[in-house]
Amino acid sequence: MKVYLKNIKIDRGCFSSEKAVIYTDYNDKVMSGFFGDDYIKDGGLEVSVIDMEEDWAFVTPKGGYFLEYDSGIGVRVSDLYNEKGELISTKSLDGSVK
């Protein structure tokens, strides 16, 4: 299942095949990075969910990285959606994190 991080600001990147993405993480820290166009869909950035609790999740973005972090970030679960635009929950991941 593809998971997308929403509530992001998307702007032009340095190159024609990328976008700049700005996000405020679970701890209210603002971060930015550059990500390939192939990983941005309908205003969301594709991510892999590493761990998820009731109200927060630890994810790694695909197609780039946030400049402030070289790996994963903590996000609000309410900012995670699937390809159909449905909110992600621990139940929707069938008990396993992918």
Image (cartoon, rainbow, N blue to C red):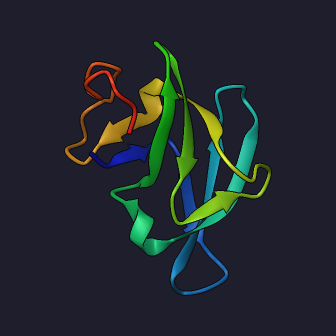
Q: Is residue 33 left or right of residue 7?
A: right
Which residue of the protein is positioned furthest toward the top in this rendering?
54
Q: Is residue 88 left or right of residue 59?
A: left
Q: Is residue 81 above or below residue 68?
A: above
Q: Is residue 33 above or below residue 90?
A: below
Q: Position of residue 73 (x, y in %)?
A: 65, 39
70 on left or right of 38: right
Residue 10 rendering spot, x and y as whole percentages: 54, 60
> Measured from the top left, where is residue 9 in percent x and y?
56, 53
Depicted 98 relative to depicted 22: above or below: above
The image quarter in which residue 19 lies:
bottom right
Q: Quarter of the image containing the N terminus?
A: top left
Q: Nearer the viewer, residue 19 or 36?
A: 36
Residue at x 50% of width, y 16% of height: 55
- The spot of residue 92 in percent (x, y) is 25, 26
- How many circles with numbers are drawn on the protein? 0
Q: Residue at x 19, y 44 (%)?
A: 84
Q: Residue furthest front?
A: 96
Quadrant position of residue 12 = bottom right
Q: Nearer the viewer, residue 54 or 26?
A: 54
Quadrant including the C terminus: top left
Q: Residue at x 43, y 64 (%)?
A: 39
Identified at 74% across, 53% down, the residue is 70
* Residue at the limit of the structure toward the bottom, as seen here: 16
